[in-house]
Image (tube, rainbow, N blue to C red):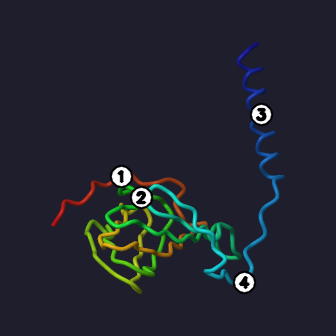
Amino acid sequence: MTRRDLLVALIAVALTLTGVAAMQPKPEPLRSQVWDWKDMVAKPNATGEVRTVVRAPTVTLEELEIHITTLKPGLASHAPHQHPNEEMLVVREGTVEALVDGQLKRVGPGSIIFQASNQLHNIKNVGDVPATYHVINWKTAATPKVSAPKASAPKAQ
């Protein structure tokens, strides 16, 4: 097999895979709807539980993802991390400490936390009862496709 044969074969494979991907049906955009709290199933996990609401494109978003997390007292959802999509959290109950723009912020019910694209963040239940919060995150055509290099975690103040 010559280099030319290999190059032709690679081009053919790439075109075939591109064609197959293009033929995959795109999901329909999310339509207006209501999700009733009593119908949401809580799935236990190591830190508490999660209720998955939706993960779908909308007319204006490539993806809208909503879930609700309940954290056990003293636990964090995950280590500080970052991702290209932005997200907003709405605290339903309990007291949480959120890493926001390099600082730890303590907030309670009704509070709103916005995490910008590629900013190091996490959330921890600092109360003595479960903390529940709604997570809404989205991706648009403008959302970066990869994460920026990780920043360092904050020092306790």
Question: Residue at label 2?
Answer: 82
Marks 1 and 2 close (CB-CB < 8 Å): yes
Q: Counting other residues with Cα less than 10 Å from the Cα at mark 1, is it few (<14), some (14-19), or many (20 or more)?
A: few
In the visual, does 148 lie left or right of 64? left
Residue type at mark 4: give it: Ser
Determine the CA span between mark 2 and mark 4.
Answer: 30 Å
| Res 74 → quadrant | bottom left
Dot 1 falls on a residue whose secondary structure is: loop
Q: Are marks 3 and 4 in contact (CB under 8 Å)?
A: no
Residue 56, quarter of the rendered image:
bottom right
Numbered circle sitting on residue 150: 1
Q: Nearer the viewer, mark 1 or mark 3?
A: 1
Instruction: For the residues labelled 2 and 3, say whether their Cβ atoms are less than 8 Å apart.
Output: no
Q: Position of residue 37 (x, y in %)?
A: 61, 80
Q: Secondary structure at mark 4?
A: loop
Rendered position, 70 above or below 91: above
Look at the image and tell me whether residue 6 can be seen: yes
Foreground mark, 2 or 3?
2
- Measuring from the top left, give residue 32's x and y in whole percent: 72, 83
What residue does disc 4 label?
Answer: 32
Position in image of residue 23 (x %, y %):
84, 52
Disc 4 to disc 1, how far (Cα)?
A: 37 Å
Q: Earlier in the sequence, mark 1 or mark 2?
A: 2
Amino acid type, label 2: Gln
Which is more N-terminal, label 1 or label 4?
4
Residue type beneath disc 1: Lys
Question: Quarter holding the N terminus?
Answer: top right
The residue to which callout 3 is attached is 13
First in sequence, mark 3 or 4: give its number. Answer: 3
